[in-house]
Image (spheres, rainbow, N blue to C red):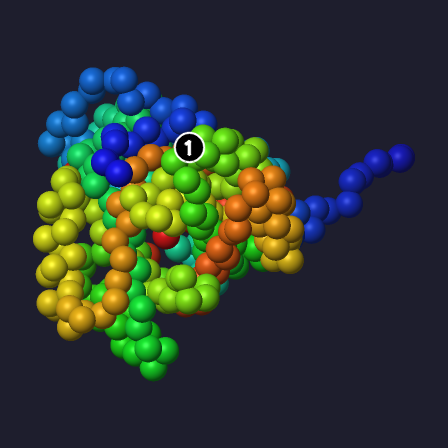
Amino acid sequence: MHVISSPPPDQTSAQERLRIALQDGLPLSPRPYQALAQQCGLSEQDVIEALLTWEQSRLTRRFGIVINHHKIGYTSNAMVVWEVADSEVNRLGAAISRTGLVSLCYQRRPDGPDWPYNLYCMLHGKSREEVLQRLQRLKTQCGLQDTPCAVLFSLRQYKQCGGRYAHKRPSAPVKEAL
Amino acid sequence: MTAQPIHPHATGRITHDSSDYQLDSVDRRLINTLQIGFPICDEPYAAVASELDISETDLLERLQRLLHTGYLTRFGPFYHAERLGGGLTLAAMEIPAHDVERVTAAINRHAEVAHNYERDHALNLWFVVATEKPEHIDAVLTAIALESGYPVHNLPKQREFYVGLHFHA
């Protein structure tokens, strides 16, 4: 008897198929991991284990929804950038994160005398006034009153395809990139 | 420069902002809950529905509706992009008002550009570039600088302190 069998798919390609299957989001059916499993030729248990492993190894942060924050009323969004001493970045980054006033906080490489800012955070509100009030609270709580900073409100969004993770081209993880 | 309304998808994915669907209290609870996480188990929707004290069918219908009406843009995993092995950076350019449309078009032609925002600052165009290989970032930024005729600031992330995009609905 001649059996033509394809080689067993290796782990990498199975994971890759799963990542591609997830690009459009989780299926909206009672057993979504089973639906994904069928798409990638895995078992439901394989999918669940792979996703748990991704979470444990911090390949993924979490599962969940991305909301359109403009649509629920958060129409004012500002990126606030600070110029802080290298020795202060870690302390201030942690302090800003703890306030609960920001959605993101990153250290980024400064770029010459025109752009000395190295600590970034994102503030949101239902009006510019609300965002600026939050900024005042942030400054007070973190002792940033005298730290050089710039406030960049978003005016227009020209392109948004974040969250889609083509296997060839990972994209940014957040709704409003910072 | 005055603030203008955000147009979330001048060139991006189509959502349905024109919908006048209004959230009810269950939708709001659902949104607040699912921003935190989603279970990985055989019947995750049943688990969430039970937590929200609604039926699984009701939950699935609501999710469908919230996606369709554009309240939710996506439902799935969030990756640590840098752990996928690709390149990722934030770039910024200072473009005079009369040239913003042309330069924006030049930037957005690149498939590697994921987000592109105009901000209220001299450095006014801000975009995220994601490439398959880290070493390709420079090529994309160089191409954009050449095509647009303006310099590009490359502002890669050095450390992440906090990511928690939670909005109270």
Judge left or right: residue A126 versus residue A5. left
Where residue B120 appears, as percent x and y from the top left, is 29, 44
| Residue in view at x 50 percent, y 36 percent | B103
Instruction: Work out whether B137 lies above or below B44.
Output: below
Instruction: Specify whether residue A5 is in view.
Output: yes
| Residue in view at x 15 percent, y 40 percent | A126
Report the residue marked by disc 1. B98
Judge left or right: residue B130 versus residue B4. right
How many callouts does the rendering have?
1
Q: How packed is label 1: few (under 14 Cα within 10 Å), some, or many (20 or more)?
A: few
Return the residue nearer the eye: B149 or B107. Answer: B149
Amino acid type at circle 1 is His
Considering the image in quadrants, where does the N terminus of chain A appear? top right
| Residue in view at x 36 percent, y 78 percent | A86
Return the residue nearer the eye: B30 or B108. Answer: B108
* Chain at tag 1: B
Judge left or right: residue A1 versus residue B143. right
Q: Secondary structure at mark 1?
A: helix
| Residue in view at x 46 percent, y 34 percent | B99
Instruction: Specify whether residue A176 is in view.
Output: no
Where residue A121 appears, as percent x and y from the top left, is 29, 58
Instruction: Work out whether A93 lies above or below A130.
Output: below
**Residue placed farthest to the right in the image?**
A1
Return the residue nearer the eye: B38 or A123. Answer: A123
- For residue A161, which quarter of the picture? top left
Where residue B24 appears, as percent x and y from the top left, is 13, 27
Where residue A10 appears, as percent x and y from the top left, is 69, 51
Return the residue nearer the eye: A82 or A104. Answer: A82
Judge left or right: residue B108 versus residue A157. right
